[in-house]
Image (tube, rainbow, N blue to C red):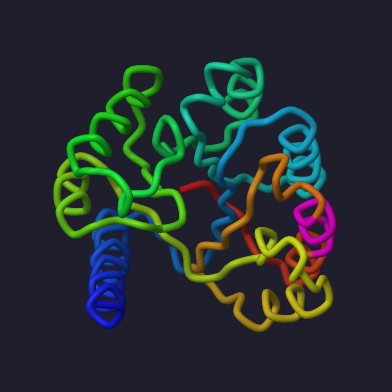
């Protein structure tokens, strides 16, 4: 069962990346920073301020329930010319609910804000939900993770070094902008942005 799930995940990853390239979402001369789970106060402003220091643009995958709570944060993200993607309404796991429940949750987000960009929480999708969603959505996974979700296992120097090693033109990098992972994001994001600047990378939204 575990092997089958890994094969399904690999297929979904491959097809989603193929879709992004086919639609011209990925340029070879850019890095794509993405942020999940917010917006939540404090950390969202911090991320936006750090990006502004470096004149960097990014993509924010928002949970619909947080957009409802903090509409002013969504307005600021949009005002600063970043991209918005759906992260479902209630941040649910596709492996723990029916396909219909999952699609209804995505639709609830779309009723607030319709965006072609979609990232499943935890990167988790079933084949059925994947093929249902890809008709209308660009499903965005990631090439490289900041590990800011690791919490007690987080090691700043190791995670930063892994980021540097994995960074190359055209990669999508995963970060978060939520309270749960705030401490880790605050540590690693400024250091990584400084390094990206030193390497003359262009940081664009999807």
With 125 as the anchor, is 164 left or right in this view?
A: right
Name the residue nearer the viewer: 141 or 53: 141
Residue 96: % across, % down: 32, 49
Name the residue nearer the viewer: 59 or 22: 59
**Based on the displayed image, in which of its 4 quarters is residue 103 positioned?**
top left
**Based on the displayed image, in which of its 4 quarters is residue 40 positioned?**
top right
**In the image, residue 57 above or below residue 141:** above
**Based on the displayed image, in which of its 4 quarters is residue 196 positioned?**
bottom right
Q: Does residue 189 show up magenta in the picture?
A: yes
Would you say the magenta stretch is mainly helix, strand or loop? helix
Q: Does residue 126 show up magenta in the picture?
A: no
With 19 as the anchor, is 84 left or right in this view?
A: right
Residue 190: % across, % down: 82, 56
**In the image, residue 164 above or below residue 30:** below
With 199 as the anchor, is 140 left or right in this view?
A: left
Q: Residue at x 24, y 77 (%)?
A: 1
Please state the extent of the stretch shown in magenta in the rendering: 184-191
Residue 75: % across, % down: 60, 19
Name the residue nearer the viewer: 146 or 150: 150
**In the image, residue 170 above or below residue 184:** below
Name the residue nearer the viewer: 134 or 1: 1
**In the image, residue 185 above or below residue 92:** below
Q: Residue at x 24, y 35 (%)?
A: 101
Q: Residue at x 67, y 74 (%)?
A: 163
Q: Residue at x 18, y 59 (%)?
A: 127
């Amino acid at each position: 069962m575990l092997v089958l799930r890994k094969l399904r995940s690999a297929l979904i990853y491959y097809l989603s990346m193929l879709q992004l390239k086919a639609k011209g979402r990925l340029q070879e001369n850019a890095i794509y920073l993405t942020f999940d789970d917010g917006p939540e106060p404090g950390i969202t402003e911090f991320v936006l301020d750090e990006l502004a220091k470096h004149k960097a643009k990014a993509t924010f995958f928002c949970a619909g329930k947080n957009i409802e709570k903090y509409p002013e944060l969504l307005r600021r993200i949009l005002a600063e010319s970043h991209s918005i993607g759906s992260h479902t309404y209630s941040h649910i796991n596709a492996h723990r609910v029916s396909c219909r429940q999952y699609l209804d949750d995505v639709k609830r987000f779309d009723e607030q804000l319709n965006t072609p960009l979609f990232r499943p929480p935890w990167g988790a999708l079933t084949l059925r939900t994947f093929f249902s969603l890809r008709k209308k959505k660009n499903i965005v996974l990631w090439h490289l993770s900041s590990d800011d979700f690791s919490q007690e296992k987080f090691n700043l120097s190791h995670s930063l070094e892994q980021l540097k090693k994995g960074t190359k033109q055209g990669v999508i990098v995963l970060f978060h902008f939520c309270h749960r992972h705030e401490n880790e994001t605050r540590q690693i994001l400024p250091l990584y942005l400084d390094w990206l600047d030193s390497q003359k990378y262009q940081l664009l939204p999807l």
